[in-house]
Image: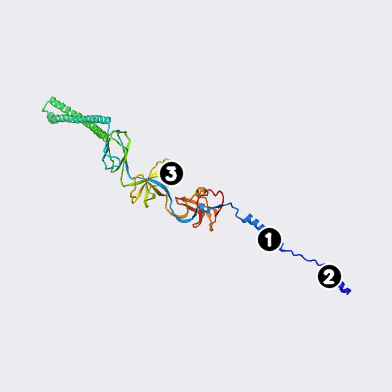
Amino acid sequence: MASLLATGSAGKHKYMDRKIKKKKWTFKRIALYTLALAFVAFVVNQFFFSDRRSTLKVEREKITVSKVSRGVFQDYIPQTGTVEPSKTIYLDAIEGGTIKRVVRQSGAMVKKGDVILELSNLNRELSVLSQEASLNESINRVRQTRLQLSQNDLSQQQSMARIRNELDKISPRYNREKMLFEKKLISQQQFEQTEADYKFHKKNWDIVYRQYRNDSLERIRQLEQLNESESRMMQSLDGVGLILDNLTIKAPLEGQLSTIQLEEGQAIIGGERLGQVDVVGSFKVRVPIDELYLPRISTGLGATTTFNREEYILKITYIYPTITNGRFEVDMDFVGKTPEGIKRGQSLRLRIELGQSSEEVLIPVGGFYKDTGGNWIFVVDETGTRAERRRIRIGRKNSEFYEVLEGIEPGEQVITSSYETFGDNEVLILG
């Protein structure tokens, strides 16, 4: 019995002295490590992988989102031109004076040569009469001189005829007496007398002939000068007569007359512009353009305009060389038909082409360009709730689109309104 107790007691102590091992991965410990690992992963993710760019929440209703597209880019500039008659002749008072009679009023239709008004200038008229008298006197003197030269020529010819006649008469006599003298049929004294007369008349003829020849050359030169002088004086006389014609203002061509207010008795200064005559039914458009575009503007460039809901085509026909206040002007003519009902002084909106059309990636024009200079833009993601800044490169511009050279593709959406309130934020949250 005692042995059994002893044995039981020993076994009891054996079981009581055995060390119980504790569990290493308890639920509490696992949860603690899991939380620590998650915290480390969060920190690492925030430090290395999270988007730390500055963001700004923007109300979608306050921005403009546009779609990038591919289409035809027309390089043109919008300008406003003024309708003018295709041909205008200005009326200037060449001579000053007082209006004697107004024949046709402003707005009247005139034909070429129609009298518009008449001026009177007594001092000018007296001056013209004096000049005409002086020129007529000079012309008469020239004609008198020419007559005297002709008379001198006739007188010399008569003298030559007499001398030649004497020579012709004595020449046979000299030849006969020479033969008789050689045959000793007449005396030496008689022959010498005849020979002396013959030589005298022959020498006299030579002298007179040379003088006439020289005088004839000089006379021809003088007559040419006299004729030229008379011609100039006749032209001057005609010009003096036209001075009085300038006191009558006539229509230079057929068209519509436009003048300043003209009344009888009104004083007009020489050189004063009185009005103009415009060709009716034919128009051109005068367009001022910024000097920035001068290197790209040339004659022949086309343009379009809309009048009464119909489109018309024009082309540049003349470029004015002067630049005023940073702008130069061009004249444009209608190609084909001219708009019906168009009037002088009317304004037309034009689109002047600067180059050939081409297919490009396009962004609608907007206020973003002022804030970015076209170097970057906010691109909206596919969800439509977020927009990120992206670098782009923009080329040409017209009134509707920017040409995109690189950075975005057709189909993407971008914010084209002003970025003034976005600051330096790189990401926008669209709410």
Q: Amino acid at mark 1?
A: Thr
Residue 370 place in picture, x, y as percent:
50, 48
Figure quadrant of the N terminus:
bottom right
Q: Which mark is residue 34?
A: 1
Residue 171 place in picture, x, y as percent:
14, 30
What kind of element bears circle 1? Answer: helix
> Do we see residue 90 in this rendering?
no
Depth check: 160 or 296 in front?
Answer: 296
Report if the CB atoms under discs 3 and 1 are less than 8 Å apart.
no
Chain-order first, disc 1 or disc 2: 2
The residue furthest top is 189
- Inter-mark Cα distance, 3 to 1: 73 Å
The residue furthest left is 185
Instruction: Count residues near mark 2 (Cα–Cα under 10 Å), then give few for <14, some for 14-19, many for 20+.
Output: few
The residue furthest right is 2
- Closer to the camera: disc 3 or disc 1? 1
- Residue 5 appears in which quarter of the rendering? bottom right
Residue 353 place in picture, x, y as percent:
41, 50
Depth check: 189 or 165 in front?
Answer: 165
- Inter-mark Cα distance, 1 to 2: 42 Å
Residue at (83, 70) in percent of width and height? 12
- Residue 242 appears in which quarter of the rendering? top left
Figure quadrant of the C terminus:
bottom right
- Residue 190 appears in which quarter of the rendering? top left
What residue did someone put label 3 on? Answer: 291
- Closer to the camera: disc 3 or disc 2? 2
Q: Which mark is residue 12?
A: 2
Instruction: Count residues near mark 3 (Cα–Cα under 10 Å), then give few for <14, some for 14-19, many for 20+.
Output: some
On screen, residue 111 versus residue 151, left or right, reads right
Q: Amino acid at mark 2?
A: Lys
Residue 182 place in picture, x, y as percent:
13, 29
